[in-house]
Amino acid sequence: MWLKFLLAAGFALSLVVALVLKPGEPRADTGNRRDLAGKIDRGQNGRRLRLMTWNIGNGELESETRAHATDLPAVAQVIMDNDADAVALQELTGEDQLQLLLTHLKNQYRGYACSRGGGDRVDAVLVKGRSGSLLKPDREEGLRMGALAEARASAMSDRSARFNDVPAGDHFAAAATFRLQKYRPEIVFVSAHADAFSAARRRNFTADVVDWARSQTKGELAFVAGDFNFEVSTRNKNNLFTDDGKHDSESYAYLLKYFRDLGRDAGETSINDRRIDYIFGPSETISLSRAEVLRGAAVGRMDHWPLLVEVAF
Amino acid sequence: MITQLRLELLKLVRSKGFYLSFAALSAFVLLMLWGFYSYAQQKTGGLANEQFKYTYESGSYFNGLTFTLYSLMFAFSLVIPIFVAMSAGGQIAGERRAGTLRMICVRPVARVSVVLSKFLVVAIHTYLLLAFFIGLNLLVGLLFVGWGNLELYPGPLNLVDTPGRILRDDALWRFFYASFSGAWALLVVAAIAMLLSVLCDNPVTAVAATLAVYLTLYIVGRIEFFVVLRPYFFTTVMDFWRVVLKPEVPWPDVYHYAATCGAYIFGLLLLSVLIFERKDITS
């Protein structure tokens, strides 16, 4: 009898322990926003940089999968509402569409679309470059400085931005080099879009983008953003979206060898619960204050949401 | 109970199946060694670098600890459960098939003692299998592949989300922990097999049914369509054993899933005992 009682007690005790000790939530399942402002240490007195990446193409397979011109006003509104300092965009049809977007952005941004290469779509990079908000002091600092001082500081900001094609794999990525403020380090920001169908091509493309970004960073801050089309999360027991998980593992590992995955805790960025859009930044010199996937931002038949990160340095 | 346990242990060590399970696992280790060795040679032989600039599969990556990890991951999911199911599924149904169950039950021994002593023997067998397998892999890895740190990357084995490293000595401890967490997880399969062994007259039916349930849930749990159902499968819970091999062990997860496994084990055993006590044994 006592053995049966022992079994019943073991069963009840196990149930209680299982219910009381909840497992830690998997990172990628924990919602779409991570506001880490409370954890900032170094960045409190530094500058903040807000970056966004967004594949504005469409998931409608039977018609145009590139960005739709009709979606651009909404895209521009999301960018302006979130006051992004630099934006990486993917799947634009070309230069014409970029110019249309810049118009919708009321010319507050300057942009560059990379060379087309062999494909039918291009990546673009936007840098905020007109108003004084190029320089974005911390709230406390802004209050201390006052409006006059802020305007003077704005005038000091170096608004020039250089744009480049980044030859990577068999096509190109787009890059911008700019400063938030004079005497601040240059920021290199790459907008990339890796192959959706071949993990081997993704791997070569990623290696080239990483090598290019590293070659540009002599004291500058390098950020690589875009749709890399790979997902190596432990959530995915069986990833049906890749032809070779090993290549994707190599691609991600190479990026993490030199960069930090800033949107890691922000959740999925694309339909089918996939986190394939990334913003990678320096491992040491910045602190992450916010990483958020803007879930309500997609319009029409877009299959990606924008990823927004804010860092202090 | 102690006498019963001693008798069951004696039966275990005299059975051919006991030695067959160790022999089969040894053969699996040799197969893995051949595969791992040839793969490592191919990847470090310069062929990989012709197509790609970078790979983490360097000479330091391929070492005895990585070999043990790969071998253990694959064997745990698909090989060792077969032997555990065979061992547990044959306990009651095997006695019934051999005509010895009636004789055991007419003795002045509580039926709960019979079931529990048989399950304890299965538990010992399970632990020995896993400990032997890990030990053999480490030994073979040391002798034929060499030592180093355990380097982990996201993607393969689905173990980590970011690249990580476990130093050699720490990694050895982790494998020691894995022998316990793995054995505990496998006891869920053993408990299911024990229940089916009580229910079925034929040990082959009990073992086949156990493996069918295990493999069905294991495969279904890996199909994206059933992602909502996945947390409710015991095969998902069993997967907790490997988190002790992460660079930072999430202990709350370990305790939670180990307790959930415990609920399965004790619950199924209790059910087995209750059914066995009420069963009319006519053969």
Image (cartoon, coloured by chain):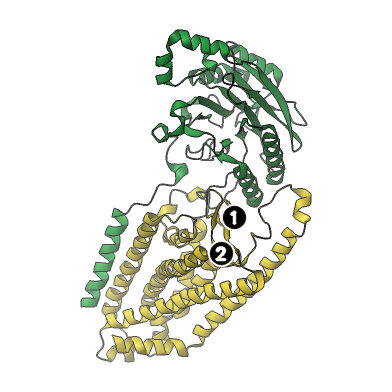
Chain colours: A green, B yellow
For residue B173, above or below residue A226: below
Secondary structure beneath dot 1 equals: helix
For residue B192, above or below residue B17: above
* Disc 1 from disc 2: Cα separation: 11 Å
Question: Which sits in the foreground, B251 or A266?
Answer: B251
Count residues near mark 1 (Cα–Cα under 10 Å), then give few for <14, some for 14-19, many for 20+. Answer: some
Chain bearing mark 1: B
Where residue A143 sits in the image (x, y, percent)?
40, 15
Q: Which quadrant of the view contains residue B6? A: bottom left
Where residue A291 sits in the image (x, y, percent)?
48, 33
Question: Which sits in the foreground, B210 or A120?
Answer: A120
Numbered disc in front, either 1 or 2 = 2
Q: Which quadrant of the view contains residue B61? A: bottom right
Q: Going by the picture, which residue comes out furthest to the top?
A: A148
| Residue under numbered circle 1 | B156
Where residue B250 sits in the image (x, y, percent)?
42, 54
Dot 1 or dot 2: first in sequence order is 2
Q: Are marks 1 and 2 on the same chain?
A: yes
The residue lying at 37 percent from left, 73 percent from top is B195
Count residues near mark 2 (Cα–Cα under 10 Å), then give few for <14, some for 14-19, many for 20+. Answer: many
- The answer to whether any part of residue A124 appears in the image is no
Where residue B265 sits in the image (x, y, percent)?
35, 68
Check the picture and name the quadrant holding the N terminus of chain A: bottom left
For residue B191, above or below residue B164: below
Q: Amino acid at mark 1?
A: Pro
Q: Is the C-beta separation of discs 1 and 2 under 8 Å?
A: no
Secondary structure beneath dot 2 equals: helix
Q: Amino acid at mark 2?
A: Leu
The residue lying at 52 percent from left, 25 percent from top is A50
| Residue under numbered circle 2 | B69
Chain bearing mark 2: B
